[in-house]
Image (tube, grey):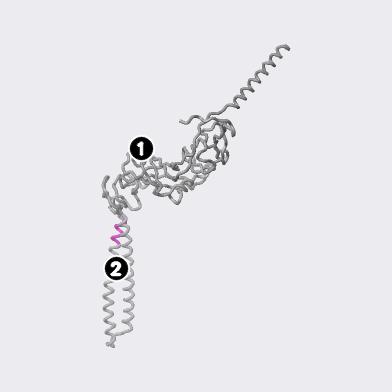
Amino acid sequence: MKRAMIIAGVFLLVAGFIGLNLVNQASNEVMAVDVTHLKEQTMTESVIISGTLQLADQQSVYYEPDKGKVGELLVKEGDEVQNGTPLFRYDNEQLELEKKQMELQLRSNLLQLENIKKQHRKIDRQVAKAETDDMLDKDELEMEHDQIFLEEQQLKIEKEQTLLQRQSIDSQLEELTVKSKIDGVILRINEQAAMSSESIQPLIQIAAPGQFVVKGAISEYDALKIKEGQPAVLTSDAVPGEKWGGTVDSVSFLSNEHEQMEPVNGETAKVQYPIEIRVEDEQLDIKPGFQILAEIETNKKNGWTLPLSAVKQDGADNYVYVVKDGKAERHKVKAGMTTNREIEITGGLSKNDQVIVNPPENLEDGAEVTVNDQA
Protein backbone atom coordinates (compact mmCIF):
# COMPACT_ATOMS: atom_id res chain seq x y z
CA MET A 1 0.00 0.00 0.00
CA LYS A 2 2.80 2.36 0.91
CA ARG A 3 4.61 1.46 -2.29
CA ALA A 4 1.51 2.29 -4.39
CA MET A 5 1.21 5.70 -2.80
CA ILE A 6 4.85 6.45 -3.56
CA ILE A 7 4.37 5.47 -7.22
CA ALA A 8 1.24 7.70 -7.48
CA GLY A 9 3.10 10.63 -5.96
CA VAL A 10 5.97 10.24 -8.42
CA PHE A 11 3.44 10.10 -11.29
CA LEU A 12 1.75 13.33 -10.20
CA LEU A 13 5.11 15.07 -9.83
CA VAL A 14 6.16 14.09 -13.34
CA ALA A 15 2.79 15.20 -14.77
CA GLY A 16 3.15 18.56 -13.05
CA PHE A 17 6.58 19.12 -14.55
CA ILE A 18 5.28 18.23 -18.00
CA GLY A 19 2.29 20.62 -17.69
CA LEU A 20 4.49 23.45 -16.45
CA ASN A 21 6.81 22.91 -19.36
CA LEU A 22 3.93 23.05 -21.84
CA VAL A 23 2.67 26.30 -20.30
CA ASN A 24 6.11 27.85 -20.54
CA GLN A 25 6.37 26.77 -24.16
CA ALA A 26 2.97 28.28 -24.90
CA SER A 27 3.84 31.56 -23.21
CA ASN A 28 7.07 31.76 -25.16
CA GLU A 29 5.38 30.96 -28.49
CA VAL A 30 5.78 33.80 -31.04
CA MET A 31 2.51 34.70 -32.77
CA ALA A 32 2.44 35.20 -36.54
CA VAL A 33 0.31 38.22 -37.53
CA ASP A 34 -0.80 40.11 -40.62
CA VAL A 35 -0.21 43.85 -40.72
CA THR A 36 -1.40 46.87 -42.67
CA HIS A 37 -0.68 50.58 -42.85
CA LEU A 38 -2.80 53.70 -42.85
CA LYS A 39 -4.21 54.30 -46.31
CA GLU A 40 -5.51 57.56 -47.66
CA GLN A 41 -8.80 57.11 -49.49
CA THR A 42 -12.23 58.60 -50.10
CA MET A 43 -14.77 57.53 -47.51
CA THR A 44 -18.50 57.56 -48.07
CA GLU A 45 -21.02 57.47 -45.23
CA SER A 46 -24.54 56.34 -46.10
CA VAL A 47 -27.93 55.60 -44.58
CA ILE A 48 -30.16 52.81 -45.87
CA ILE A 49 -33.92 53.25 -45.66
CA SER A 50 -36.92 51.41 -47.07
CA GLY A 51 -39.79 53.01 -48.95
CA THR A 52 -42.50 52.51 -51.53
CA LEU A 53 -42.29 53.41 -55.22
CA GLN A 54 -45.04 55.84 -56.24
CA LEU A 55 -45.88 58.02 -59.19
CA ALA A 56 -44.54 61.50 -58.54
CA ASP A 57 -47.56 63.49 -59.68
CA GLN A 58 -50.91 61.82 -59.07
CA GLN A 59 -54.46 62.68 -58.12
CA SER A 60 -57.06 60.45 -56.51
CA VAL A 61 -60.66 61.63 -56.80
CA TYR A 62 -63.10 60.28 -54.20
CA TYR A 63 -66.88 60.17 -54.26
CA GLU A 64 -68.49 62.85 -52.06
CA PRO A 65 -72.08 61.79 -51.25
CA ASP A 66 -73.09 65.22 -49.92
CA LYS A 67 -72.71 66.65 -53.44
CA GLY A 68 -75.24 64.29 -54.95
CA LYS A 69 -75.17 61.32 -57.29
CA VAL A 70 -72.46 60.86 -59.90
CA GLY A 71 -73.85 61.78 -63.29
CA GLU A 72 -72.15 61.22 -66.63
CA LEU A 73 -68.45 60.38 -66.64
CA LEU A 74 -66.69 62.69 -69.06
CA VAL A 75 -63.46 60.68 -69.41
CA LYS A 76 -62.39 57.05 -69.78
CA GLU A 77 -59.35 55.03 -68.78
CA GLY A 78 -56.30 55.89 -70.86
CA ASP A 79 -57.44 59.42 -71.71
CA GLU A 80 -54.83 62.15 -71.48
CA VAL A 81 -56.05 65.11 -69.43
CA GLN A 82 -54.74 68.53 -68.52
CA ASN A 83 -55.10 70.62 -65.41
CA GLY A 84 -58.73 71.78 -65.46
CA THR A 85 -60.14 69.02 -67.68
CA PRO A 86 -63.72 68.07 -66.51
CA LEU A 87 -63.83 64.47 -65.27
CA PHE A 88 -67.48 64.03 -64.26
CA ARG A 89 -70.42 65.95 -62.86
CA TYR A 90 -72.63 65.37 -59.83
CA ASP A 91 -76.41 65.47 -60.25
CA ASN A 92 -77.92 67.54 -57.45
CA GLU A 93 -81.63 68.14 -57.90
CA GLN A 94 -81.90 70.20 -54.72
CA LEU A 95 -79.34 72.74 -55.92
CA GLU A 96 -80.96 72.94 -59.34
CA LEU A 97 -84.32 73.61 -57.68
CA GLU A 98 -82.80 76.28 -55.46
CA LYS A 99 -81.27 77.94 -58.50
CA LYS A 100 -84.66 78.09 -60.24
CA GLN A 101 -86.20 79.55 -57.11
CA MET A 102 -83.50 82.21 -57.01
CA GLU A 103 -84.14 83.03 -60.68
CA LEU A 104 -87.85 83.47 -59.97
CA GLN A 105 -87.08 85.54 -56.88
CA LEU A 106 -84.77 87.75 -58.89
CA ARG A 107 -87.41 88.27 -61.58
CA SER A 108 -89.91 89.23 -58.89
CA ASN A 109 -87.39 91.68 -57.38
CA LEU A 110 -86.77 93.29 -60.75
CA LEU A 111 -90.50 93.66 -61.48
CA GLN A 112 -91.16 95.24 -58.10
CA LEU A 113 -88.18 97.50 -58.49
CA GLU A 114 -89.27 98.63 -61.93
CA ASN A 115 -92.78 99.37 -60.62
CA ILE A 116 -91.49 101.40 -57.66
CA LYS A 117 -89.18 103.34 -59.98
CA LYS A 118 -92.21 104.33 -62.05
CA GLN A 119 -93.96 105.51 -58.88
CA HIS A 120 -90.81 107.40 -57.92
CA ARG A 121 -90.69 109.22 -61.25
CA LYS A 122 -94.41 110.05 -60.99
CA ILE A 123 -94.14 111.47 -57.47
CA ASP A 124 -91.07 113.45 -58.51
CA ARG A 125 -93.18 115.17 -61.18
CA GLN A 126 -95.97 115.88 -58.69
CA VAL A 127 -93.55 117.35 -56.12
CA ALA A 128 -92.09 119.58 -58.82
CA LYS A 129 -95.58 120.72 -59.90
CA ALA A 130 -96.53 121.52 -56.30
CA GLU A 131 -93.85 124.21 -56.28
CA THR A 132 -96.10 126.34 -58.54
CA ASP A 133 -99.55 124.88 -57.92
CA ASP A 134 -101.12 125.94 -54.61
CA MET A 135 -103.91 123.42 -55.08
CA LEU A 136 -101.47 120.53 -54.37
CA ASP A 137 -100.40 119.65 -50.83
CA LYS A 138 -96.62 119.81 -51.08
CA ASP A 139 -95.93 118.37 -47.61
CA GLU A 140 -98.12 115.36 -48.19
CA LEU A 141 -96.48 114.72 -51.57
CA GLU A 142 -93.01 114.91 -50.04
CA MET A 143 -94.00 112.38 -47.35
CA GLU A 144 -95.30 110.06 -50.07
CA HIS A 145 -92.07 110.62 -52.02
CA ASP A 146 -89.95 109.68 -49.03
CA GLN A 147 -91.96 106.51 -48.49
CA ILE A 148 -91.60 105.47 -52.14
CA PHE A 149 -87.86 106.23 -52.00
CA LEU A 150 -87.49 104.01 -48.90
CA GLU A 151 -89.36 101.14 -50.54
CA GLU A 152 -87.14 101.48 -53.61
CA GLN A 153 -84.00 101.22 -51.48
CA GLN A 154 -85.37 98.15 -49.67
CA LEU A 155 -86.14 96.47 -53.01
CA LYS A 156 -82.60 97.20 -54.20
CA ILE A 157 -81.23 95.53 -51.08
CA GLU A 158 -83.49 92.52 -51.63
CA LYS A 159 -82.25 92.30 -55.23
CA GLU A 160 -78.60 92.35 -54.08
CA GLN A 161 -79.33 89.63 -51.52
CA THR A 162 -80.97 87.51 -54.20
CA LEU A 163 -77.99 88.02 -56.51
CA LEU A 164 -75.60 86.94 -53.74
CA GLN A 165 -77.67 83.83 -53.05
CA ARG A 166 -77.72 83.00 -56.74
CA GLN A 167 -73.95 83.53 -56.92
CA SER A 168 -73.49 81.12 -53.99
CA ILE A 169 -75.65 78.51 -55.70
CA ASP A 170 -73.75 79.00 -58.98
CA SER A 171 -70.49 78.39 -57.12
CA GLN A 172 -71.89 75.20 -55.59
CA LEU A 173 -73.11 74.08 -59.01
CA GLU A 174 -69.67 74.82 -60.44
CA GLU A 175 -68.14 72.57 -57.81
CA LEU A 176 -70.39 69.75 -58.98
CA THR A 177 -68.14 69.50 -62.04
CA VAL A 178 -65.00 67.73 -60.83
CA LYS A 179 -61.86 68.64 -62.75
CA SER A 180 -58.34 67.31 -63.04
CA LYS A 181 -55.73 69.15 -60.99
CA ILE A 182 -52.73 67.79 -62.90
CA ASP A 183 -51.57 66.95 -66.41
CA GLY A 184 -51.59 63.19 -66.78
CA VAL A 185 -53.37 60.03 -67.86
CA ILE A 186 -56.54 58.42 -66.46
CA LEU A 187 -55.15 55.27 -64.89
CA ARG A 188 -58.32 53.86 -63.44
CA ILE A 189 -62.06 54.52 -63.14
CA ASN A 190 -63.81 52.59 -60.39
CA GLU A 191 -67.55 53.20 -60.82
CA GLN A 192 -68.30 50.89 -57.89
CA ALA A 193 -66.75 53.52 -55.59
CA ALA A 194 -69.77 55.76 -56.32
CA MET A 195 -72.26 53.10 -55.24
CA SER A 196 -71.61 53.45 -51.51
CA SER A 197 -71.20 56.49 -49.29
CA GLU A 198 -68.73 54.53 -47.17
CA SER A 199 -66.35 53.57 -49.99
CA ILE A 200 -62.67 54.25 -49.30
CA GLN A 201 -61.58 53.53 -52.87
CA PRO A 202 -60.93 56.42 -55.29
CA LEU A 203 -63.43 56.88 -58.09
CA ILE A 204 -60.79 58.14 -60.54
CA GLN A 205 -57.00 57.93 -60.42
CA ILE A 206 -54.81 60.20 -62.54
CA ALA A 207 -51.03 60.24 -62.81
CA ALA A 208 -48.24 61.70 -64.88
CA PRO A 209 -46.49 58.60 -66.32
CA GLY A 210 -42.73 58.16 -66.21
CA GLN A 211 -42.13 60.28 -63.11
CA PHE A 212 -41.52 58.25 -59.94
CA VAL A 213 -40.66 58.94 -56.32
CA VAL A 214 -39.83 56.75 -53.34
CA LYS A 215 -41.73 57.68 -50.20
CA GLY A 216 -40.67 56.45 -46.77
CA ALA A 217 -39.90 57.55 -43.23
CA ILE A 218 -36.65 58.03 -41.32
CA SER A 219 -35.72 58.18 -37.65
CA GLU A 220 -35.04 61.42 -35.81
CA TYR A 221 -31.34 60.50 -35.78
CA ASP A 222 -31.19 60.00 -39.55
CA ALA A 223 -33.27 63.17 -40.07
CA LEU A 224 -30.28 65.15 -38.77
CA LYS A 225 -27.98 63.66 -41.44
CA ILE A 226 -30.19 63.38 -44.51
CA LYS A 227 -30.58 66.60 -46.51
CA GLU A 228 -32.26 67.65 -49.74
CA GLY A 229 -30.12 67.07 -52.82
CA GLN A 230 -28.13 64.10 -51.46
CA PRO A 231 -27.65 61.28 -54.00
CA ALA A 232 -29.18 57.85 -53.48
CA VAL A 233 -28.84 54.39 -55.03
CA LEU A 234 -32.15 52.53 -55.30
CA THR A 235 -32.61 48.76 -55.41
CA SER A 236 -35.48 46.29 -55.15
CA ASP A 237 -35.51 42.67 -54.03
CA ALA A 238 -37.98 42.05 -56.85
CA VAL A 239 -35.31 42.84 -59.45
CA PRO A 240 -31.96 41.52 -58.14
CA GLY A 241 -28.89 43.21 -59.56
CA GLU A 242 -30.72 46.30 -60.83
CA LYS A 243 -29.87 49.77 -59.54
CA TRP A 244 -31.39 53.18 -60.20
CA GLY A 245 -30.22 56.67 -59.38
CA GLY A 246 -32.14 59.01 -57.10
CA THR A 247 -31.93 62.30 -55.25
CA VAL A 248 -33.44 63.28 -51.91
CA ASP A 249 -36.25 65.65 -52.85
CA SER A 250 -37.59 66.52 -49.40
CA VAL A 251 -37.36 65.68 -45.72
CA SER A 252 -40.40 66.79 -43.75
CA PHE A 253 -39.86 69.35 -41.01
CA LEU A 254 -42.71 67.75 -39.07
CA SER A 255 -42.94 64.13 -37.95
CA ASN A 256 -45.70 61.73 -38.91
CA GLU A 257 -48.76 62.56 -36.82
CA HIS A 258 -49.66 58.90 -36.41
CA GLU A 259 -46.30 58.33 -34.75
CA GLN A 260 -47.29 60.65 -31.90
CA MET A 261 -49.27 57.92 -30.19
CA GLU A 262 -49.69 56.77 -26.64
CA PRO A 263 -46.95 54.43 -25.39
CA VAL A 264 -47.47 50.78 -26.28
CA ASN A 265 -46.55 48.22 -23.62
CA GLY A 266 -44.83 50.96 -21.68
CA GLU A 267 -42.60 51.95 -24.63
CA THR A 268 -42.83 55.34 -26.31
CA ALA A 269 -43.59 55.17 -30.02
CA LYS A 270 -40.65 56.09 -32.23
CA VAL A 271 -40.83 59.42 -34.01
CA GLN A 272 -40.37 59.25 -37.78
CA TYR A 273 -40.13 61.91 -40.47
CA PRO A 274 -41.50 61.51 -44.02
CA ILE A 275 -38.92 61.54 -46.79
CA GLU A 276 -39.32 61.67 -50.56
CA ILE A 277 -36.64 60.60 -53.04
CA ARG A 278 -36.94 61.53 -56.71
CA VAL A 279 -36.09 58.69 -59.10
CA GLU A 280 -33.77 59.99 -61.82
CA ASP A 281 -34.30 57.06 -64.21
CA GLU A 282 -37.50 57.21 -66.27
CA GLN A 283 -37.41 53.62 -67.54
CA LEU A 284 -38.05 51.20 -64.68
CA ASP A 285 -38.75 47.46 -64.70
CA ILE A 286 -40.93 47.79 -61.62
CA LYS A 287 -44.33 49.25 -60.89
CA PRO A 288 -45.80 51.65 -58.33
CA GLY A 289 -46.25 49.94 -54.98
CA PHE A 290 -42.96 48.00 -55.09
CA GLN A 291 -40.78 48.11 -51.98
CA ILE A 292 -37.50 49.97 -52.51
CA LEU A 293 -34.24 50.13 -50.57
CA ALA A 294 -32.51 53.49 -50.84
CA GLU A 295 -28.87 53.94 -49.87
CA ILE A 296 -28.46 57.69 -49.31
CA GLU A 297 -24.97 59.18 -49.36
CA THR A 298 -24.87 61.51 -46.35
CA ASN A 299 -21.14 62.31 -46.17
CA LYS A 300 -18.05 61.99 -48.37
CA LYS A 301 -14.47 62.90 -47.46
CA ASN A 302 -10.81 61.94 -47.86
CA GLY A 303 -9.09 60.44 -44.81
CA TRP A 304 -6.47 58.05 -43.45
CA THR A 305 -8.14 54.71 -42.81
CA LEU A 306 -7.68 51.22 -41.39
CA PRO A 307 -9.79 48.09 -41.81
CA LEU A 308 -12.48 47.84 -39.13
CA SER A 309 -10.96 44.52 -38.04
CA ALA A 310 -7.76 46.27 -36.94
CA VAL A 311 -9.42 48.54 -34.38
CA LYS A 312 -10.59 47.30 -30.99
CA GLN A 313 -12.61 49.02 -28.30
CA ASP A 314 -12.15 49.27 -24.58
CA GLY A 315 -15.15 51.15 -23.28
CA ALA A 316 -15.17 54.50 -25.05
CA ASP A 317 -11.52 54.12 -26.15
CA ASN A 318 -10.31 52.81 -29.52
CA TYR A 319 -6.97 51.05 -29.77
CA VAL A 320 -4.80 49.05 -32.15
CA TYR A 321 -1.71 46.84 -31.88
CA VAL A 322 1.41 48.09 -33.65
CA VAL A 323 4.40 45.84 -34.37
CA LYS A 324 7.61 47.42 -33.09
CA ASP A 325 10.92 45.62 -32.57
CA GLY A 326 9.19 42.25 -32.85
CA LYS A 327 6.61 43.00 -30.19
CA ALA A 328 2.96 44.06 -30.20
CA GLU A 329 2.42 47.48 -28.70
CA ARG A 330 -1.03 48.71 -27.79
CA HIS A 331 -1.72 52.22 -29.11
CA LYS A 332 -4.75 54.33 -28.29
CA VAL A 333 -6.12 56.00 -31.44
CA LYS A 334 -8.67 58.65 -32.32
CA ALA A 335 -11.38 57.51 -34.72
CA GLY A 336 -13.53 59.54 -37.08
CA MET A 337 -15.90 58.50 -39.81
CA THR A 338 -16.84 54.81 -40.12
CA THR A 339 -18.10 52.81 -43.09
CA ASN A 340 -19.01 49.13 -43.46
CA ARG A 341 -15.35 48.19 -44.00
CA GLU A 342 -13.09 51.04 -42.95
CA ILE A 343 -12.63 53.43 -40.08
CA GLU A 344 -10.97 56.85 -40.25
CA ILE A 345 -8.00 57.36 -37.93
CA THR A 346 -7.52 61.00 -36.96
CA GLY A 347 -4.77 60.61 -34.37
CA GLY A 348 -2.45 58.20 -32.55
CA LEU A 349 -0.66 56.63 -35.53
CA SER A 350 1.79 57.51 -38.25
CA LYS A 351 1.44 56.27 -41.84
CA ASN A 352 4.50 54.01 -41.46
CA ASP A 353 3.23 52.11 -38.42
CA GLN A 354 2.65 48.39 -38.93
CA VAL A 355 -0.85 47.80 -37.57
CA ILE A 356 -1.96 44.24 -36.81
CA VAL A 357 -5.06 43.13 -38.70
CA ASN A 358 -7.49 40.87 -36.81
CA PRO A 359 -5.38 40.74 -33.61
CA PRO A 360 -5.92 37.45 -31.69
CA GLU A 361 -8.09 37.65 -28.60
CA ASN A 362 -5.22 36.48 -26.39
CA LEU A 363 -2.76 39.04 -27.79
CA GLU A 364 -1.32 41.18 -25.02
CA ASP A 365 0.68 44.36 -24.93
CA GLY A 366 4.38 43.47 -25.27
CA ALA A 367 3.79 39.98 -26.71
CA GLU A 368 6.40 38.76 -29.20
CA VAL A 369 5.07 38.56 -32.78
CA THR A 370 6.35 37.85 -36.23
CA VAL A 371 4.92 39.44 -39.36
CA ASN A 372 3.66 37.15 -42.09
CA ASP A 373 5.04 37.69 -45.55
CA GLN A 374 2.89 40.22 -47.40
CA ALA A 375 1.62 39.05 -50.77
Q: Secondary structure at mark 2?
A: helix
Left or right of 303, for residue 179: left
- Between 74 and 300, the one nearer to me in the picture: 300
Q: Is residue 219 highlighted in magenta?
A: no
Q: Quadrant of residue 111?
A: bottom left
Left or right of 96, for residue 346: right
Give the extent of the magenta segment.
94-101
Q: Are marks 1 and 2 in contact (CB under 8 Å)?
A: no
Q: Residue furthest right?
A: 2
- Between 147 and 281, the one nearer to me in the picture: 281
On-image quarter of the N terminus: top right
Q: Residue furthest front?
A: 325
Q: Is residue 55 above or below residue 141?
A: above
The residue at which mark 2 appears reads as 109
Q: Which mark is residue 183?
A: none
- Between 108 and 269, the one nearer to me in the picture: 269
Q: What residue is at 32 percent from the left and 67 percent from the top?
A: 160
Q: Secondary structure at mark 1?
A: loop
Q: What's the amino acid at mark 1?
A: Glu
Q: Is residue 98 highlighted in magenta?
A: yes
Tell me if residue 160 can be seen: yes
Magenta stretch secondary structure, dominant: helix
Left or right of 11, for residue 336: left
Q: Is residue 167 above or below residue 287?
A: below
Q: What's the amino acid at mark 2?
A: Asn
Mark 2 Cα shell of 10 Å, populated few (<14), some (14-19), many (≥20): some
On-image quarter of the C terminus: top left
Where is residue 354? Give x, y as percent. Answer: 52, 36
The residue at which mark 1 appears reads as 242
- Between 184 and 168, the one nearer to me in the picture: 184
Q: What residue is at 63 percent from the left and 22 percent from the top?
A: 21
Where is residue 359? Give x, y as percent. Answer: 53, 33
